[in-house]
Amino acid sequence: MPKHPDHRGKATLGERIVPLEEFERAAARHGRSLDPAGRRGARAELLRVPDDGVAVEGPFARIAVFGGVYSNHRALVALLDDATRRGAEAIYCLGDLGGFGPAPEKVWPLLEQGGVLCIQGNYEESLAGDAEDCNCGYTDPRDNRFAELSYRYTAENSSSAYRHWMGRLPLRRRVRVGARELLLVHGSPRRINEFVFRSTSPVAYLETIARAERCDGFLCTHTGLYWHRALPSGRDAINVGVIGRPANDGRPCVWYAMLEDGPTLKVEHVALSYDHVGLAHEMRNESLPGEFVETILSGWWTTCLEILPARERAASRF
């Protein structure tokens, strides 16, 4: 095999750096040679994701899916009414029930009374496990400071019974919409706190995930920004957005997704109006950060901006 012109002629053999020729001789003695079909099979086996054993729910013709409640009980009430009016046969929540908003335990009876089918987000995983932080995935000190304030408030106002209920929620679900099997996760199929943004998620990456998970599409949240990409294979990658705070677009409404069966999967991102002024008043009464209140009223993020990739940050006010 000809060497790449920039190759330095060295390779790692065990714990030693050796000349490339020595490595090739050792590989010839101890390795195995595969024909092209064998190499393809070996590669497929290496990348194969084991069956997750998650039962498929449905089938449904029309479902509503949302994420990131962030203790916004007022938006949750509005969503349950709106999704029912739009004919949703099932309603799914992709986690992060607490954080940001006031009185976190108010959302629990609403979810149960509304028959919402939930999974764990990083908030539920952390609260149920008595973790010290929300495992939100931030790296910026300012983001982490606000995350700490939000998580501490949620933890102090969540009962042990509520935490126990959170811990019993599954980490993922599968649902059939028509003939399509969709995987529901919080951050990504790979990691509960992975940020899957539209601008930094190339088609090849999304196709690889969906193919490895043996699904016709996957739905996630966590970033706070909704989007949908129909992939060349016919699969779909969907971020359903959040109902806990606006989508950083200067409007106080929040967003969720309606999915409907058809020749192709119909995905509608729904703008949801609710009593955001009343929520802001509650947040002030609970002495939550003024930055959080400003976001609820203005529709612009004032925190968690450092996580945004360049394109999403360029669309921001701040």
Image (cartoon, rainbow, N blue to C red):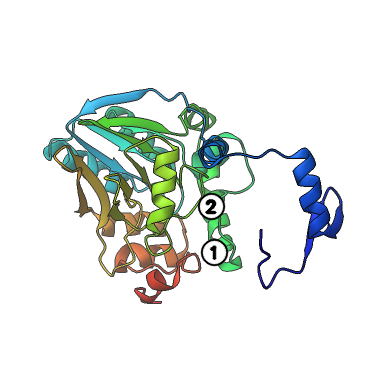
**Residue 304 x %, y %:** 48, 64
Q: Nearer the viewer, residue 222 or 80?
A: 222
Look at the numbered discs 1 and 2 and tell me whether their residues touch, using CB distance below 8 Å: yes
Q: Which residue is mark 2?
A: 136
Examine the image and state in which quarter residue 174 appears.
Answer: top left
Secondary structure type for disc 1:
helix
Amino acid marked by disc 1: Asp
Secondary structure type for disc 2:
loop
Q: Is residue 301 above or below residue 83?
A: below
Q: Is residue 47 above or below residue 19?
A: above
Examine the image and state in which quarter residue 16 appears.
Answer: bottom right
**Residue 194 x %, y %:** 50, 51
Residue 303 located left or right of residue 114: right
Q: Are there few (<14), some (14-19), or many (20+) residues within 10 Å of tag 1?
A: some
Q: Nearer the viewer, residue 23 or 192?
A: 23
**Residue 4 x %, y %:** 66, 67
Amino acid marked by disc 2: Cys
Residue that appears at 71% across and 68% down:
7
Is residue 155 visible in the rendered image? The answer is yes
| Residue 23 numbered mark, or none | none
In three-dimensional space, the C-alpha distance between marks 1 and 2, rounded to whole angstroms, equals: 10 Å
Residue that appears at 28% across and 70% down:
250
